[in-house]
Amino acid sequence: MATREDLAARQIPQSDPAMPVVQHRTAGVHWPQYVNNHRLVGGLVAGFAALHIADMIGYWLPGVGLPKLDFAFFNGSLLMPKVPGAPQWFEGHIFHTLNGLVFALGYALLIFPLMGKTLTTARNVARGVAMGMTLATLSCLWWIPTQFPALHAGFMSHNLGWNLVLAVYVWHLAWSLAIGFFFNPQD
């Protein structure tokens, strides 16, 4: 067993000029640098996180007077409209998750590189918001009217009420903010 004197003898004095001073560094790579080197993984993580954050916002929208947006149910009703007893929500959730990952990967691997290099988180968030608002506009302009023709949604889905259109934009804003923060490479 080592004595106190043995332990003191093994310690290197702090004032020894021959020994370099090593500062503490965090283990691993910081997320923006990791995403910069691994865009596919970064896009998948960002897409998964953003989709689930936005889905929770969609379920909570009635708390602020907007309609609930349950895209898992919507997709399930489109995929399995007349199957009695079908697990529409579960099937719709699987499709919705895969769909969200495809949009996130399309953004991360195709659209984001076309926008040039960036050095700030604020610019990455702005890019994500631009993507999200584009998707919200396409959703109101094309997706809702064509997928639910019995609703007679009208131009920009305005026949369904301003609160539904606002809810679609709020949902996509939540998704796009999360995409911008999670997919945040620093070139």
Image (spheres, rainbow, N blue to C red):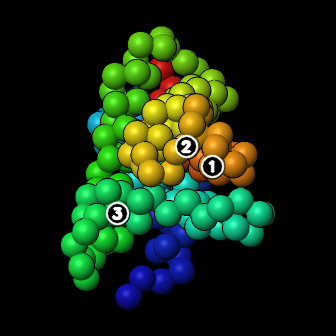
Q: Position of residue 59 (x, y in %)?
A: 58, 67
Q: Position of residue 169 (x, y in %)?
A: 63, 42
Task: Say above or below: 16 vs 68.
Answer: above
Kindly state the secondary structure of the residue where label 2 is placed: loop
Front position in the image: 78 or 42: 78
Label placed on residue 160? 1
> Is there any visible trace of residue 131 in the rendered image?
yes
> Label 2 is placed on what type of residue?
Ala
Residue plotted at (55% across, 43% down)? 153
Q: Position of residue 43 (x, y in %)?
A: 37, 39
> Is there any visible trace of residue 37 in the rendered image?
no
Q: CA distance from mark 3 to mark 2?
A: 17 Å
- N-term-proximal mark, 2 vs 1: 2
Q: Is residue 143 left or right of residue 90?
A: right
> Label 3 is placed on what type of residue?
Ser
- N-term-proximal mark, 1 vs 3: 3
Marks 3,2: beta carbons within 8 A: no
Label placed on residue 77? 3
Marks 1,3: beta carbons within 8 A: no
Residue plotted at (55% across, 60% down)? 69
Task: Say above or below: 165 vs 80.
Answer: above
Q: Is residue 161 left or right of residue 142?
A: right
Q: Position of residue 4 (x, y in %)?
A: 54, 80
Q: Which residue is mark 2?
A: 153
Front position in the image: 178 or 1: 178
Residue plotted at (64% across, 44% down)? 159
| Image quadrant where one finds the N terminus | bottom left
Q: How many marks?
A: 3
Image quarter of residue 33 = top left
Kindly state the secondary structure of the residue where label 1 is placed: helix
> Label 1 is placed on what type of residue?
Leu
Kindly state the secondary structure of the residue where label 3 is placed: helix
